[in-house]
Image (cartoon, coloured by chain):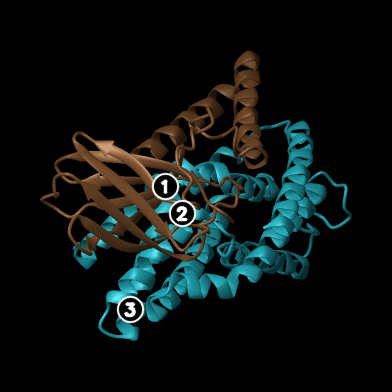
């Protein structure tokens, strides 16, 4: 709320200045107009409004098989089922370790590269020796973007990300 | 496992974060359009009502998610309704844009009022002002159904909490509370957009409104196309 109050104070200050100085008046009008213009343009070009403009590298095809990655000396594979992997469907996420067994259960955070989609965490539970499984949903983004990432975190060890496309 | 109170706080901060990181870009144009259409009237009350309506819908959806414990079941049922709402939002923005510039003989929807003299007429004007401001609440409720990634994510949390609850009623209450928390978190960012888009204090603003009208029509068309293709 502090940031909002500051901005409102600045706006009031501009409003005061507007009464006296023609140049300032023009600057204020142009700035506010550009702000509104930018906001509206965001709707038309959600990709352009994205903070991360470079296309995210898709490093895994979840529709055909598991994704593999490594974290220090541990090999990690991520399997998402059922296939093909569709948004807005109940999905099962299976993480398999090759090497050392983690001390604490890992978990997965689902998100879109460069866009805050809120906290979507898949809690994994042991489902065998070095195998962890959990249920989750990949939601559909109305912008039309289909690239998602699954960040597998092993507490106290680190995290590995898998970037893939889903079907809407 | 997080406690219920902690989940409320986490989801509130999540709403706060996605508000500034996501909603400003995706829902900001709708809010900006509503502000522009007020044409100089105070934006605070209409936008509080709009946000209240939006949060009410979130809360109701959260309650249903919590009671059923299933995100995909509920969203599958409301998918076609969301598609209609997306198209409807586009049409509203187009009509508001056209009316704001005076290109539609409707006056400004939610905005301008007949301003005659006389006690009866003044009374009617006050009534119409109240009505037009109150319109923002049901409008917010309707637009709360717009498909939105972070809202879906919050609803997943509500459904999950419902699944773990001891009864459907308790699940429903937790889901309701979670979505209200999430919705409240998104309010500051959208109020900020509403205030920024309020050009009412500028003395000569006709040209701004004309250009904004064109943008609103383009955005409205974009929403309609998105809705049809969704």
Quadrant (top left/top right/bottom left/bottom right) for the N terminus of chain B? bottom left
Asked if disc 1 and disc 3 are in contact, CB closer than 8 Å, the reply is no
Question: Picture coordinates of residue B63 (x, y %)?
Answer: 41, 76
Q: Is residue A115 above or below residue B43?
A: above
Of all chains in the rendering, the one displayed in cyan is B
The chain containing the residue under callout 1 comes to A
Q: Is residue B147 above or below residue B169?
A: above
Q: Are marks 1 and 3 on the same chain?
A: no
Q: Which residue is mark 1?
A: A111
The chain containing the residue under callout 2 comes to B
Question: For the residue carrying disc 2, how many other residues have a C-alpha within 10 Å: few (<14), some (14-19), or many (20+)?
Answer: many
The chain containing the residue under callout 3 comes to B
Question: Picture coordinates of residue A70 (x, y %)?
Answer: 27, 37
- Image quadrant where residue B115 sits: bottom right
Q: Considering the numbered disc 3 on the image, is that residue within a helix, a strand or a loop?
A: helix
Give the label, 1 or 2, closer to the camera.
1
Of residues A132 and A4, the one drawn nearer to the viewer in this rendering: A132
Q: Are marks 2 and 3 on the same chain?
A: yes
Q: Which residue is mark 2?
A: B150
Give the label, 1 or 3, closer to the camera.
1
Task: State how far apart marks 2 and 3 are (Cα).
Answer: 21 Å
Question: For the residue carrying disc 3, how many other residues have a C-alpha within 10 Å: few (<14), some (14-19), or many (20+)?
Answer: many
Task: State how far apart marks 1 and 3 are (Cα).
Answer: 26 Å
Residue at 59% from the left image edge and 36% from the top image edge: A47
Residue at 51% from the left image edge and 63% from the top image edge: A88
Residue at 65% from the left image edge and 39% from the top image edge: A40
Task: State how far apart marks 1 and 2 are (Cα).
Answer: 10 Å
* Labels 2 and 3: the sequence-earlier one: 2
Q: Which residue is mark 3?
A: B171
- Image quadrant where residue A74 sits: top left
Of residues A5 and B153, the one drawn nearer to the viewer in this rendering: B153
């Amino acid at each position: 709320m502090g940031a909002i109050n500051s901005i409102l104070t600045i706006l009031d200050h501009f409003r005061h200045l507007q009464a006296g100085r023609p140049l300032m008046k023009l600057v204020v009008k142009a700035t506010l107009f550009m702000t509104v213009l930018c906001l509206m343009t965001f709707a038309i070009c959600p990709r352009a409004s994205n903070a991360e403009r470079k296309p995210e590298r898709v490093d895994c095809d979840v529709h055909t098989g598991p994704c593999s990655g490594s974290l220090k000396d541990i090999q990690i594979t991520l399997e998402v089922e059922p296939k093909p992997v569709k948004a807005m469907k109940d999905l099962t996420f299976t993480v398999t370790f090759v090497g050392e067994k983690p001390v604490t259960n890992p978990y997965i955070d689902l998100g879109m590269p460069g866009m805050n989609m809120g906290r979507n965490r898949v809690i994994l539970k042991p489902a065998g020796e070095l195998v962890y499984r959990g249920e989750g949903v990949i939601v559909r983004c109305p912008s039309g973007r289909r690239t998602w990432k699954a960040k597998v975190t092993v507490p106290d060890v680190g995290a590995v990300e898998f970037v893939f496309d889903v079907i809407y | 496992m997080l406690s219920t109170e902690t989940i409320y706080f986490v989801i509130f901060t999540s709403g706060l974060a996605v508000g500034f990181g996501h909603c400003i870009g995706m829902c900001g144009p709708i809010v900006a359009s509503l502000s522009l259409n007020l044409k100089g009237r105070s934006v605070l009350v209409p936008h509080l009502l709009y946000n209240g309506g939006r949060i009410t819908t979130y809360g109701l959806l959260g309650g249903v998610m919590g009671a059923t414990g299933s995100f995909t079941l509920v969203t599958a049922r409301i998918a076609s309704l969301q598609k209609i709402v997306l198209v409807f939002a586009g049409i509203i923005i187009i009509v508001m844009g056209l009316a704001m510039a005076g290109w539609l003989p409707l006056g400004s929807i939610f905005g301008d009022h007949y301003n005659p003299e006389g006690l009866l007429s003044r009374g009617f004007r006050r009534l119409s002002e109240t009505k037009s401001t109150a319109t923002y609440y049901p409008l917010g409720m309707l637009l709360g159904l717009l498909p939105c990634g972070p809202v879906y994510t919050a609803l997943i949390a509500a459904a999950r909490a419902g699944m773990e609850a001891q009864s459907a009623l308790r699940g429903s209450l937790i889901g309701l509370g979670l979505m209200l928390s999430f919705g409240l978190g998104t309010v500051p960012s959208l109020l900020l957009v509403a205030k920024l888009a309020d050009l009412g204090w500028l003395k000569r603003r006709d040209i701004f409104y004309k250009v904004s009208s064109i943008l609103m029509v383009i955005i409205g068309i974009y929403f309609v196309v998105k809705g049809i293709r969704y």
